[in-house]
Amino acid sequence: MEVLEIILLILAYSLIIIALFLEVICYTKNIETLETIYFTVSLLLLIVALTITYFFKPFNSDSTNIFILLAMILVALTTPLHILEERRHTVKPIFKKLLIAFSGMLTILVISGHFIKILNFLQFVVALFLGISVVLSMILIRITKPKVNIVHREKMERYIAIAVLILIPLSLLTNYVADLNGINTKIGFTLPLIFIVLAGSKLWSDIERLSLFKPKNTVKEQNLINYSLTNREKEIALLLIKGNTYKQISEQLFISIPTVKTHVSNIYRKCKINNRIELISLLSS
């Protein structure tokens, strides 16, 4: 059983690290959000905390338990934030502020929990917070539509949501049965499996996003005409789709970076979009 746990952990580590690397690349191309990167970093911190606590006994103490709880709070916070950033919804901004405030308050309590002897109670609260956060986020995916920049992975997102909602109780049941039969599980299967599912979906999504910059994705001339772009804006739109940065566009067209930014803003306004990936999807369709 321990061998299987180690295999799952190695696979989870690999997928998370690769996904994070691709997310940073996508962010530099303006096709990924900081919220998603924060989410992946929080997953990595949580799995590191779990590994230290359960596989290195000399380090197993209240301090490492606090590390786990803080990482769990971070995951509970970043999961809905990055889902909200990618979906079309009517959730008011006050929800984000309340979520951040509650996470901050819980963080302070966990840090001070060792001294006021409420750490055991806080473990239950944090676990409940994480569970509710993940479940509500998956439900949000099921009942909302994606923004244009992630519409290419809509079916996968919905399947992932179903998988996570099924995986959580099923994995918990597996751990419970293992305990009843005297099988020692140091870390269990729930979190590693969820990490694998989430990191795997993000990895595949970013590969698809980066593939949009391949030369095979040509822009139809008629699409450029439809949005009344000027000749200069057409030039810049084509360079954006090829993956050029503002600096590269500036150097190729011999114009200043502020001028590039002004043209890009005009392109986005005329096309009624917000970012480069939406531009690619719109003009290449």
Image: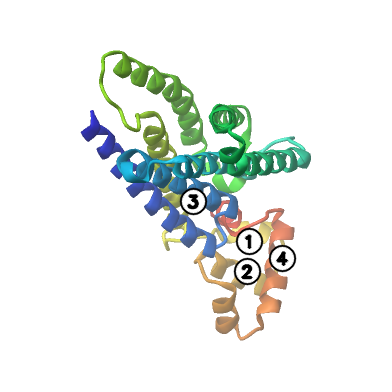
Cβ–Cβ under 8 Å for marks 4 and 3: no
Residue ID for mark 3: 41
Give x and y (percent) for residue 104. Answer: 67, 44
Q: Are marks 1 and 2 in contact (CB under 8 Å)?
A: yes
Residue located at (44% from left, 54% from top): 20
Could you tell me the amino acid type at mark 3? Answer: Val
Front in this rendered view, residue 166 or 226: 166
Query: Which residue occupies 60% across, 80% down?
Result: 250
Mark 4 vs mark 1: which is more N-terminal? 1
Q: Is residue 285 visible?
A: no
Query: Mark 3 or mark 1, which is nearer the start of the sequence?
Result: 3
Q: Residues within 10 Å of mark 3 (few under 14, many from 20)?
A: some
Q: Is residue 236 left or right of residue 97?
A: left
Q: Nearer the viewer, mark 4 or mark 2?
A: 4
Give the structural element (helix, strand or loop) at label 2. Answer: helix
Residue holding disc 4: 265
**As drawn, 252 above or below 85:** below
Label 3, secondary structure: give it. Answer: helix
Q: Report the residue marked by disc 1.
A: 224
Quarter of the rendering containing residue 222: bottom right
Colouring convention used in this rendered image of the protein: rainbow
Q: Quadrant of residue 181?
A: top left
Q: Earlier in the sequence, mark 2 or mark 3?
A: 3
